[in-house]
Image (cartoon, rainbow, N blue to C red):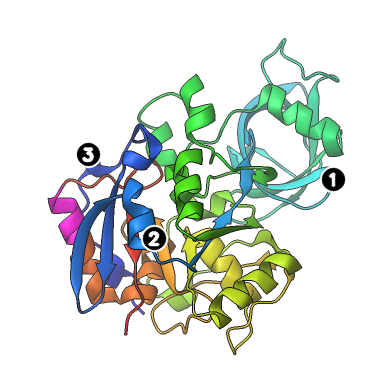
C-alpha cells in the first residue's frame, strides 16, 4: 500500500508533552467499526470490558539508554550521541548514533561527562560494526549487571524525539515514562498504552473478573523511525526481542475457550502475541526476535480488542491500527480525535479498538 494513504493533518499542539494526572484520567475513545465512536476515560475501562476478558500487558522496563560520549582518535575528539535499541549479549548492544559519520569500526567511545564515572569506572565501548542509517554495534567493556549499573549511572531516559526536542528531560519523567508494573529491564521506549494504568485500576479490573497477564517485548528505538519508503512493502522493521511464557500462553488459550476476549494493552503486546500465535489462533510459548510489520490485509489471530494511544501520521503504528479496525474507520476516528482535542502519542490519550468486521 502507498504510505501516503496513512497520512493525516496533526496540529503540533496535539502531541502531549506531559501525561494526564492521575494516569487513568486520560480520555479514552472507543472505536467500533460500523457502529461509531463512544467517549470515555481510562478509569471507565472495567465497565467497558466483560467478566472473563483478559488484559495482556507488556512488562518491559525502560532503561537509561540515551548516552552522550566522546570518540577519541589520533588525538581528535568527536562528540557522539548514542541511543541503544537492542541488546545482543551481556555486553553488546545495537544502537543509533548521532554523529555516525564520525565513527568507524574499531573506534573507542567514552561515555559520561569528563569527570563522571559509573560505580565501577568509566563506561567505555568499542564500535564493532557500522551499519546503515546511523546504526552501529557497540561492545562495552563491562558486562551483565555491571554494565546495567554503568548505563543507569551515566545514561538518561530516552524520551521520544517529538518530546525531547521541545523540552528537557526532568525528574518526573523517570516515573512518568514507566508503567507501574514494569519489571523486565531492556526497553528503550515505553509501552505507552500501559502508562494509563494505576494499581487501583488494576484492582478494580480484577474485582470485575477481568484477568491480567504479562508478556515481555523490549521496545526498541526503531519504533520512532519514520517510514521513508513510498510503499509499505519496501519498509523494513527493526527487530525487537520478546517472550511469551508458557503459563501465559496456556492461560490466554483457556480464556478464549471459555468465551472471553484477549485485550492487548498496546501495539507491543499485540505484535508479540501475533508473532507467537499459530494460524489457528492458538498462542504458543515463544521467545526470540520479531520484526513483524502489520498493515491492512493482515489476518489477526490472537487479538480480540486493542487498547492503544493515538499515533503519528505515516507511522507503522497507525498502519497497525488501520489493519485492526479498518483504514476508513481509523481515519474518521483520528479526525474526530483531532477535532475534539485528544492528546496524541506517548503521553497522550488512549483508544479502545474493536476489530473490523
Is residue 129 visible from the viewing direction of this image?
yes
Measured along the vertical axis of the image, is residue 200 above or below residue 329? above
Q: Earlier in the sequence, mark 3 or mark 2?
A: 3
Label disc, if present, on residue 315 of the rendered structure: 2
**Mark 2 residue element:** loop
Residues marked 3 and 2 touching at CB (< 8 Å): no
Highlighted magenta segment, given as a residue range: 335-340
Screen quadrant of the C terminus: bottom left
Taking the magenta stretch, the answer to whether it contains residue 337 is yes
Q: Main secondary structure of the magenta part?
A: helix
Residue 275 place in picture, x, y as percent: 62, 73
Q: Would you call the spot at circle 2 few (<14 residues within 10 Å), some (14-19), or many (20 or more)?
A: some
**Mark 1 residue element:** loop
Q: Residue at x 68, y 40 (%)?
A: 103
Task: Give the Cα separation between the discs numbered 3 and 1.
Answer: 41 Å
Q: Residue at x 14, y 50 (%)?
A: 340
Task: Give the Cα separation between the discs numbered 1 and 2.
Answer: 31 Å
Which residue is labeled 1 in the image? 90
Q: Earlier in the sequence, mark 3 or mark 1?
A: 3
Taking the magenta stretch, the answer to whether it contains residue 343 is no
Measured along the vertical axis of the image, is residue 196 above or below residue 316? above
Which residue is labeled 3 in the image? 13
Q: Quadrant of residue 277?
A: bottom right
Amino acid at each position: 500500500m502507498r504510505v501516503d494513504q496513512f497520512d493525516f493533518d496533526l496540529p503540533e499542539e496535539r502531541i502531549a508533552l506531559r501525561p494526564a494526572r492521575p494516569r487513568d484520567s486520560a480520555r479514552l475513545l472507543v472505536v467500533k467499526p460500523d457502529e461509531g465512536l463512544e467517549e470515555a476515560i481510562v478509569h471507565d475501562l472495567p465497565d467497558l470490558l466483560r467478566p472473563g476478558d483478559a488484559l495482556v500487558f507488556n512488562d518491559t522496563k525502560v532503561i537509561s539508554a540515551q548516552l552522550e560520549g566522546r570518540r577519541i582518535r589520533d588525538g581528535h575528539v568527536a562528540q557522539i550521541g548514542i541511543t541503544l535499541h537492542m541488546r545482543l549479549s551481556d555486553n553488546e548492544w545495537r544502537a543509533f548514533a548521532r554523529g555516525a559519520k564520525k565513527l568507524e569500526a574499531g573506534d573507542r567511545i567514552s561515555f559520561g561527562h569528563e569527570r563522571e564515572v559509573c560505580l565501577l569506572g568509566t563506561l567505555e565501548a568499542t564500535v564493532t560494526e557500522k551499519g546503515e542509517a546511523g546504526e552501529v554495534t557497540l561492545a562495552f567493556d563491562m558486562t551483565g549487571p555491571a554494565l546495567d549499573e554503568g548505563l543507569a549511572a551515566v545514561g538518561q531516559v530516552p524520551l521520544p524525539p517529538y518530546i525531547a526536542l521541545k523540552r528537557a528531560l526532568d525528574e518526573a519523567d523517570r516515573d512518568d515514562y514507566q508503567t507501574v508494573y514494569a519489571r523486565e529491564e531492556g526497553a528503550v521506549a515505553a509501552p505507552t498504552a500501559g502508562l494509563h494504568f494505576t494499581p487501583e485500576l488494576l484492582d478494580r479490573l480484577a474485582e470485575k473478573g477481568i484477568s491480567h497477564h504479562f508478556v515481555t517485548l523490549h521496545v526498541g528505538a526503531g519504533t520512532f523511525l519514520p517510514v521513508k519508503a513510498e510503499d509499505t512493502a519496501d519498509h523494513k522493521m527493526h527487530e525487537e526481542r520478546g517472550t511469551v511464557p508458557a503459563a501465559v500462553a496456556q492461560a490466554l488459550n483457556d480464556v478464549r475457550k471459555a468465551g472471553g476476549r484477549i485485550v492487548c494493552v498496546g501495539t507491543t503486546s499485540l505484535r508479540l502475541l501475533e508473532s507467537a500465535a499459530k494460524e489457528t489462533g492458538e498462542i504458543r510459548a515463544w521467545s526470540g526476535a520479531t520484526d513483524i510489520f502489520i498493515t491492512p490485509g493482515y489476518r489477526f489471530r490472537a487479538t480480540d480488542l486493542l487498547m492503544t494511544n493515538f499515533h503519528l501520521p505515516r507511522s507503522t503504528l497507525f498502519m497497525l491500527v488501520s489493519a485492526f479496525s479498518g483504514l476508513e474507520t481509523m481515519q474518521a476516528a483520528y479526525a474526530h480525535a483531532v477535532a475534539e482535542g485528544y492528546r496524541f502519542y506517548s503521553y497522550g490519550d488512549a483508544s479502545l479498538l474493536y476489530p473490523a468486521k
